[in-house]
Amino acid sequence: MTEHSSRSHRRRLITSTIAPKELTKWHRQIVFFRLSQLCSPMLVHFENDLVLFTDSLEQRLHNLAQRPLSDAKELLIAYRHLRKKELLTSASYAAALCAPWPRIDDHEKYAEWLGVIVLCCCQLHIQGQHDSAISSALREIRLIANDAKHAAIFEQLPMPTNTSSLAELGEQLEVLRQRYEEPNIESAGIGYLSVAVRNAAHLRKGIVRHRKIKVPEFTVTEHIAPIPLEPVDDSGLEAEQLQITPETTDSQSADERMKLEPGKTVRVHNPQQRKQTLAMMALQGQRFAEQLASRQQSLPCSFEQLTEWDIQHLLQYTLEKLKQKNVLAGWVLLALVTGRDPTWLHARAKQWKSLRLIKDWPCVQLHHHVPASQQPDMLEEVLPAVSSHFYRPLPIQLHDWVAQFSLSTKPPTASECRAWLKDINKQHSTRLTLGRIVRFMEHWCLNHGIDRAIIALMRGEPHQSRPALSYSHLHQDALVECHYRYVNAIFAMAEQVPELPAQRQTDVYLGSRLHIPESVIGNLFEVLASPLKQKRDIWAVHNDYTGYVWAVLAFATGHRDVTAPLGKITDYNPHQHTWWISDKERRHGLAARTLVIPPTAAKQVEHYLEHLRQLQIHCRFLEPELAARCQQALDGTGNLLFILTDKRDKKVPADLTPSLLEGLLQARLPWSRNWARHHLRSELVKHSVNPELIDGWMGHEEIGEEVLGRHSFLSMADCREIADIIESIFVTNKIKAFTGWTTH
């Protein structure tokens, strides 16, 4: 209390916390008006408890409370602003004051509770070291009015004005909390409110937690001695117990912890194992890999995978068992067809009812949703629609098995599958395991050049496991065609017929909706270039021109939406028209790639560099700082793309960031700024470009699968083919390279 004794300091402390400076002036006014309307009556009622509030602050709240009530629409606009800017946590007071009350019927009671909690949190903030209690209480009072899970708490709360003090109100809350025998959402929520009220009533000091570190004392150093143990069976294993015995104190300095944890440690050694040390085995493996690399060779495709011999006998054996109503045979065949293990399939069947008969045909239903599948309502008429699920027909041999499938039946375990496959492995010398059966679909598809995104989609993988899924707008017919090819191929190995239903042409798409129609994409670039045709000041022209250059280059390269996009001009080779892109960090190495940009994009780069030269000439005496920034962009010491921002009535250059681009483009780009990656990948798939080359161009290749890696069969010539396809898209949609500002 002594460090916050100044009245002016307490007033500034509260006002800066309730309405942070990140908010605009209008939003701060709305927050303070709302604070006065809710808190002024409660401050009068509990004036004996809220002793840390100054007289001047109380008078200011009383004066603001005399003004007209804030409009509900204004409060909703302020709350949406906080949510959009992700300030609900950092501006917790403002979020609680402006939050709507859709689930509250008794508005008078909730207004009193909101005022009490805000005042208690202010008193705790002045007291200090109560950040956790404050954030929890403000979040809980906001969720009570917005979240259905927390709405039941409000019905149990008493009326605050029916109590004479905060201490009495806190005791009532504590009684309510203790009624619950087990912890749940309601008991935790009441506990958060109780802590804030009781701490404010009793002016309790905050808790400062310090991490305790125990430093062991090394009085006597120790060493480990193995003690042989008598064998307990005739397996031939040799066991030793590791025992700690003291050494002399000066044998080793104790600069790190050397003492083992208490307990009995046993070391087991098998003398019958191959007499090779781990070091020798590692050296042999390294030598084997070096020879493969020097000879430009790799292991055969069937390495640790099933062969046609295995699949042939597996299918024949499984179909024979299905005729005998063997349930486990159905699980094995389903795993082979879908590329998923029984446990995963059973969980999805329980969640989505995915295994069922559709039009008297066995099918498996899979769901697929990526972030770009959901777009604002204003874009419903512009962007193509996508489906959230798709079906994969199963072989007719699974008809009876799917018809009799029950969610109550547990899937087979790995040991049960291993025991079931043991007979066929012994009879036909196959090497079948459940893992190899599950992986065979992906193995077959990769050998036949199918896109990894389609493989992941066929297996029902989430977009987090395969980033290409997030950027792909795929036709459902392409997915079904790959499924048909795979199922027919494996059944042909066993000379069987799956009798899949006839394929029907559909107009259903999956994945991202950001595949812009041809009638829209050309107009989009015209809208981005429209400000360049107007005669305005040079600063606005430079910003709009930089935005257009970024749009052209981001579309040509599929660049990610990152800070300082496209790096420096030294990353660009003007002779070969190649660009070194590094827009992603990777834990195990550098995720960079070299691309060939199309002629239109190369021409746009030349125009932009000439624009910077003209701008430097114009500003070398008027704005020396801006002229120096242009020179940095031209000689490669600074990032290529930058705009001018207002700072203290002065134009200051700033590198492009996602937030600056959002403010620069605003309504001219109504969808997300990384739309070019979505549209470009979908267009390349549409033009039947090699899937590995698409992944390399987009930066989706895995470690060891780089396009220009030593084991890759792709080359820069393949990248030039992609550049030609992108150039044809530019020409078709009339996307042109514009000149920039000039002094003439």
Image (cartoon, rainbow, N blue to C red):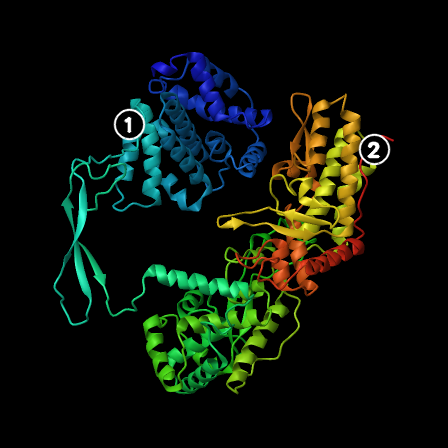
Residue 115 appears left or right of 686:
left
As drawn, is 324 to the left or to the right of 739? left
Disc 1 element: helix
> Which mark is first along the chain, 1 or 2?
1
Residue at the image position 52 percent from the left and 19 percent from the top: 64
Q: Tell whether 223 sits left or right of 171.
A: left
Say which of 609 and 22 sits in front. 609
The spot of residue 474 in percent (x, y) is: 63, 63
What is the quadrant of residue 404 in the picture? bottom left
**230 or 36, nearer to the observer:** 230
| Label 2 crowd (10 A; few <14 / some 14-19 / many >=20) | some
Disc 2 and disc 1: Cα gap in Å? 75 Å
> x, y percentage for residue 231?
14, 66
* Residue 508 appearing in the image: yes
Q: Residue at x 76, y 24 (%)?
A: 620
Q: Which residue is mark 2?
A: 742
The type of residue carrying mark 2 is: Thr
Q: Amino acid at mark 1?
A: Glu
Residue 252 percent location from the top left of the image: 23, 39
Quarter of the image with the N terminus is top left
Looking at the picture, tell me which residue is in the foreground, 34 or 536: 536
Residue at 77%, 53% (x, y): give it: 730
* Vertical side of 291 occupied by 331: above or below: below
Q: Position of residue 94 (x, y in %)?
A: 49, 30
Q: Give the number of the disc on residue 168.
A: 1
